Amino acid sequence: MVRGEALGAYRALIRATRKSFAGDTLMLRESAKEIRNKFEENRHLTSQAEIQRHLDEAREASIFMSTMIVQAKLNDRGEVKPGKEHAGATLEIPSEEILKKSV
């Protein structure tokens, strides 16, 4: 069962990078390499709690990449237009308090 969960988390991360970095060959290649390395580093884990923690982190990372990373391009007028999934979003710079809570 854990193997299936790990494979699902791995695939979700790869899909998230393909969505976030579509058209950017370098970022696609490097992010896929980094994801693979992280999963390989943790292949030896046997503690269920530790495995679950890493799987949860992988799921959170795929959600974060899918929703928070935008690779935008300038149009002919020098403007950046968000895609449909990011339309209406605002950019908020996190305060020190928010950053401390997220750690």
Image (cartoon, grey):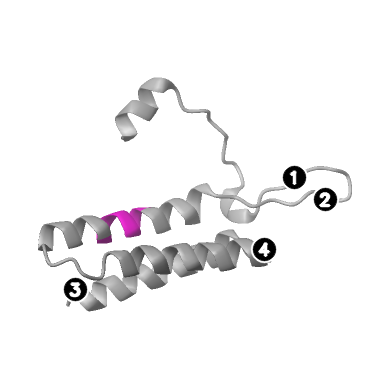
What kind of element bears circle 4?
loop
Quote the CA–CA distance across marks 3 and 1: 42 Å
Kind of residue at badge 4: Asp
Nearer the N terminus, badge 4 or badge 2?
Answer: 4
Label 4 Cα neighbours within 10 Å, binned few <14 / some 14-19 / many ≥20: few
Dot label at residue 2? 3
Quote the CA–CA distance across marks 2 and 3: 45 Å
Q: Give the magenta part as a residue range.
A: 55-60
Label 1 Cα neighbours within 10 Å, binned few <14 / some 14-19 / many ≥20: few
Kind of residue at badge 3: Val
Label 4 belongs to which residue?
24
Label 2 belongs to which residue?
75
Q: Horizontal placement of 31 versus 8: left or right?
A: right
User: Residue farthest to the right?
Assistant: 76
Q: Residue 49 or 33: which is nearer the viewer?
A: 33
Dot label at residue 71? none
Q: Residue 65 or 87: which is nearer the viewer?
A: 65
Eyeballing the image, is 79 above or below 49? above
Q: Could you tell me which residue is drawn at 25 percent across and 70 percent down? A: 43
Eyeballing the image, is 99 above or below 2? above
Quote the CA–CA distance across marks 4 and 2: 17 Å
Q: Are marks 1 and 2 in contact (CB under 8 Å)?
A: yes
Residue 59 screen position, x and y as percent: 33, 59
Quarter occupied by the N terminus? bottom left
Kind of residue at badge 1: Val
Q: Could you tell me which residue is drawn at 46 percent across and 62 percent down? A: 34
Residue 60 screen position, x and y as percent: 35, 53
What kind of element bears circle 3?
helix
